[in-house]
Image (cartoon, rainbow, N blue to C red):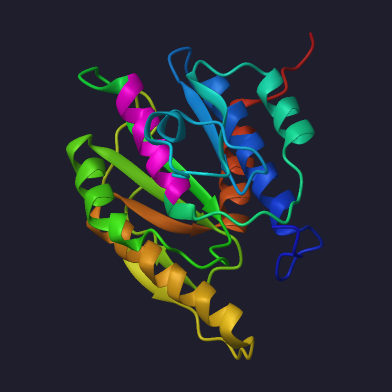
Amino acid sequence: MGVKAESSSKTRLEEALEGVRMMIESKILQSKTNEVGIILFGTEDTDNPLAEDMGDGNYENVTVLAPLERPAVSLTAQLEEDVKPGIVSADLIDGLVVAVDMMHRRTDKKKYIRSIYLITAAANPIDGDGDLEPICERLQAMDTDLYVIGADFVHSTKEEGSVIKEEGSVHKEEGPVVKSEVVDEDGGDALMTKRENEKMLVSIVEATSGRVIPAKDLVARFSVMHGKQVRPTKSK
């Protein structure tokens, strides 16, 4: 994620952090009942409940940075301080499984609007594709929307008549429409891996309620929301 984002002066990580920061700030502003948890995959250390429960090297290099709870403003500063580019590779599916588990432990049999945002460049090989069907079934059972925020994605889903779910709002959901941009690429096996991973992630959101959204679009979305929520008042 330290790689420069296409058509941007920022790295993929910087672009992702900006989107997450704005998302957290919007959650704080929108409702006192909103809760946010943050899970990192690709960390040098391992710190998550599934790794502790299962052992034997399962769910390694996945860290729970913040449990699912009411977010504090200091969480954005913690992100900036703790999240740095690294060289450790981790399976994004492991990160997703830990997120689904966190959601289940915190919200099972409780009334929540549930959403998971998976932010990734999807550039590393995936070993856990055998977990895809159980993941989809678990997301459906928990009525949880999955939004994949993709860095430099070619394959995404086009938003039609729907918006991201938020507390207390009304939505029209018509499901994802796959959008593939035609590009001239020659990046070898690494790029082929990334594109295949993108297709796999699109297939997951097709099986659940969610979308694949380019990272740059997430920043633009929350920039608009901030403009609506924070308005200057005229002094008399």
Residue 18, x across and y down, in percent: 69, 43
Q: Quadrant of residue 199?
A: bottom left
Query: What residue do we see at 82% from left, 62% from top?
Result: 9
Query: What residue do we see at 72% from left, 56% from top?
Result: 87
Q: Nearer the viewer, residue 54 or 41?
A: 54
Residue 68, x across and y down, in percent: 46, 22
Magenta residues (range): 94-106
Q: Nearer the viewer, residue 40 or 159?
A: 40
Q: Is residue 172 left or right of residue 67?
A: left
In the image, residue 95 sits, relative to residue 152, either above or below, namely above
Residue most toward the front?
Answer: 56
User: Is residue 43 located in the magenta-colored stretch of the structure?
Assistant: no
Q: Quadrant of residue 83?
A: top right
Give the quadrant of the N terminus.
Answer: bottom right
Q: Quadrant of residue 17?
A: top right
Query: What residue do we see at 23% from left, 42% from top?
Result: 138
Main SS type for the magenta part? helix
Give the total of numbered labels.
0
